[in-house]
Image (spheres, rainbow, N blue to C red):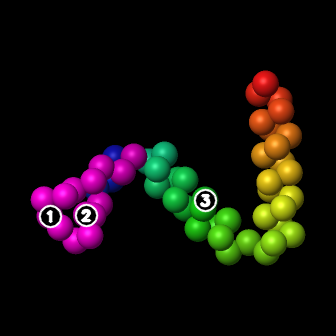
Amino acid sequence: MFRRRACGVASADVRVTEADATDTAFFRKYQKMKPKSKEKLREMLKILDDEDE
C-alpha cells in the first residue's frame, strides 16, 4: 500500500492501494493514446463487458 498526501496537508493522508495506482497509471497512458487507439480499446471493453453478462 502506498501513502500520498492530499493537497500537501500532512493531517489529510490518503491511503492508495496498489490497484488504485495501477488504474491511475493505465488512465495516464490512455490519455496519451491517439483517438483511433482509444476507440479500439473502447470496442474491446464493450466485447469484454458483453462476455460478463
Q: Nearer the viewer, residue 53 or 2?
A: 53
Which circle marks residue 5 in the picture?
Answer: 2
> Where does label 3 land, which residue?
26
Percent x, y of residue 48: 80, 38
Mark 2 belongs to which amino acid?
A: Arg
| Labels 1 and 2: the sequence-earlier one | 2
Q: Residue at x 30, y 49 (%)?
A: 15
Q: Under tag 1, what secondary structure?
A: helix
Q: Residue at x 60, y 62 (%)?
A: 27
Percent x, y of residue 2: 33, 53
Percent x, y of residue 41: 80, 56
Cα separation, mark 1 vs mark 2, equals 6 Å
CB-based contact (under 8 Å), mark 1 and mark 2: yes
Q: Under tag 2, what secondary structure?
A: strand
> Where does label 1 land, which residue?
10
Tag count in the figure?
3
Mark 3 belongs to which amino acid?
A: Phe
